[in-house]
Amino acid sequence: MHKYYLNHLQELEAEAIFVIREVVAQFDRPAILFSGGKDSIVVTHLARKAFAPAKIPLPLIHIDTGHNFPETMEFRDNLVKRLGIQLIVGSVQESINKGRVKEETGLNASRNALQTVTLLDTIEANKIDAAIGGARRDEEKARAKERFFSHRDEFGQWDPKNQRPELWNIFNGRKHQGEHFRVFPISNWTEMDVWNYIWKENIPIPSLYFAHEREAVYRDNTWMPVSEFLSLREGETIQKKLMRFRTLGDITITGGIESDADTLEKIVMEVAATRSTERGNRGDDKRSENAMEDRKKQGYF
Amino acid sequence: MATNTRELLRFTTAGSVDDGKSTLIGRLLYDSKSIFEDQIDAIRQSSERKGLAHVDLSLLTDGLRSEREQGITIDVAYRYFATPKRKFIIADTPGHIQYTRNMVTGASTANLALILVDARKGIVEQTCRHSYIASLLQIPHIIVCVNKMDLVDYSEEVFNKIVEDYTEFASKLDVTDIRYIPISALNGDNVVNHSEHTKWYHGATLLHELETIHIGSDYNHIDARFPVQTIIRPHSTEHHDYRGYAGRVAGGIFRPGDAVTVLPSGLTSTIKSIDTFEGSIKEAFAPMSVSITLEDDLDISRGDMIVKENNQAEVSQDLDIMMCWLNGKKLQPGSKFYLRQSASEVRSIVKEVLYKMDINQLQRIEDDKEIGMNDIARVKIRTTKPVAYDAYRKNRSTGSVILVDESTNETVAAGMIVE
């Protein structure tokens, strides 16, 4: 093997650090969109690496739906304290109070869709001109052609007809007044890469990702955690399960899977196994999880 | 599967409509088990609805087709799969619409190009065009997949004729590593598994080539180049005087103690340390992201390039460029642009169009110099400030530029510096 070579995780890391540094170099007020999920945790970790020994020169933005896992909030606050950086919270509850958005009602009510308004308001209020996110191209088809530097017009919208071609490693962050960019440093990572990297780097993640006992209800092919926001439907019963979450978002829309993976190594093995056996039997967990990811994306990206 | 030691191979697929490119990509994703059950279910059902006897793997990339119908710009879609040996990133460029623009974009980051040839048709105009672009973008490796071998009875003569024709054509190109594989993407012959039908073929399968082709030398490890992206100044008590130049090594190998020159200023110093989050390291090479500190306090800013004193890049305000125009708006004579190259940005003007390329005939067009979408042309550019660069042949990173329209901020052209 050639002596001067990087393995795939090292190369992906070098690429992501390069992209994050480009953001800080090209924009006046960039920020990291932090959801408390593994992808934004990895992005924050990469930002730390990009500017060491200095602090991360970026604030974290968290869009708070008010329906959070307490573990996520605790994790967020500890992280911000440890890194010594600013946290900007955009509150969906405030958007509701101000009449910017209307609370959904009904059995499937969720504040997920409302997040977009709060996010754009937060970006505008803080004059953020580049928001770094943890979205990946392997998440779904439409994301497969997203850019690293994704241009948003003055309404914060993405115009797929007007995407800038992105060549080599030259990123064009030029914009007009009022426009901003979303930037995705881990575009080229897959779910497997993210888990392998967390494992290799031993990055702290919320305990919710590890197998634990919790009360949950089986709904739409997934285990919904019991919380003050969950109302039982007819025929549903609360059960105690050894489970974990593969993605984290708003507690009202985040379902978990039955699992005994309580270490990073076991999680990596579990994700790898899920991938290779999915073809053989119907992966209902995975289906619901895709739907979950989609909803997450509508709100955040 | 949970290995951390895979290599990364980026490749682009070049093909036209109906050459089986979608099927081939679908086959690679499917046979490498990169497809989820729900995706397979969906295409199995669509295939049944269409009355097909087999699962149409080309439907896996169907998202693009429906988007096209809605009039959304489709350029490059990125797809991922991994085997125990390597992780692959496919830059999948659709065949016909704005072909040149898309393929140039996809090819810009690729180590390898897959070029599909329909066994029944042989080398056609499109094959030449794809190959020319691969050569122009200096993709180090080309694999020519002679597809649909099942439709020519897996004939060795047909395959050999195509290899012969392509080899002759390719002698006009600047590509050194070309391999040929007879395949049927539809049936999977020689894609992942050796085919029973081509006993006369003793070469590797496509996946085997993708997994083993040597890419360790694709980066230039000779000419040391470090474009400065940004400067790290912690302003903390612990690191009070720390001044690190952050960037990604674009070529060569840097070590502490190296005598370096900063371009374009020409200031000199010595590397004090090469730092990463994990600590200082003894060597940095492409494509690592690191920070470099110098022994002397110099005036260095974003866009400058640190090189070794005894091996310097070119510095000039006049650039000779092969340019691909990417925008619907034509090039207006005398228009000004921001020219971006590595981390630098300078204003520039296209002084002269020397000639346009007819990329089907590989001939120069000298009597029509109007440049529009998808045109490839040799141009002379003058910049307002000196730029440190290398010829694209020598370094794909320090030898590439983009032009940004000053009024719309759009990326309107991609360029490869000739010299």
Image (tube, coloured by chain):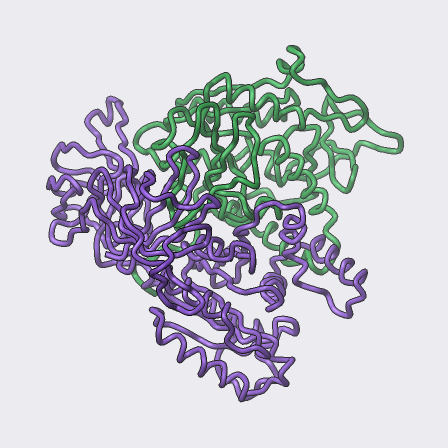
| Horizontal and vertical percent position of residue B253 | 23, 53
Quadrant for the C terminus of chain B, please.
bottom left
Whether residue B6 can be seen here:
no
The one of B336 and A148 positioned closer to us in this rendering = B336
Judging from the image, what is the letter of the chain drawn in purple?
B
Name the residue furthest top: A98
Name the residue furthest right: A234
| Horizontal and vertical percent position of residue B303 | 26, 38
| Horizontal and vertical percent position of residue A293 | 64, 39
Lateral position of residue A200 relative to residue B27, left or right = left
| Horizontal and vertical percent position of residue A61 | 50, 24
Whether residue A279 can be seen here:
yes
Identify which residue is drawn at 60% across, 64% down. B17
Q: In this view, does B286 lie above or below B130?
A: above
The one of A202 and B150 positioned closer to us in this rendering = B150
Quadrant for the N terminus of chain B, please.
bottom right
Name the residue furthest front: B367
Lateral position of residue B285 relative to residue A285, left or right = left
In this figure, what is the number of numbered marks? 0
Judging from the image, what is the letter of the chain drawn in green?
A
Identify which residue is drawn at 58% across, 34% down. A301
Identify which residue is drawn at 46% across, 26% down. A79
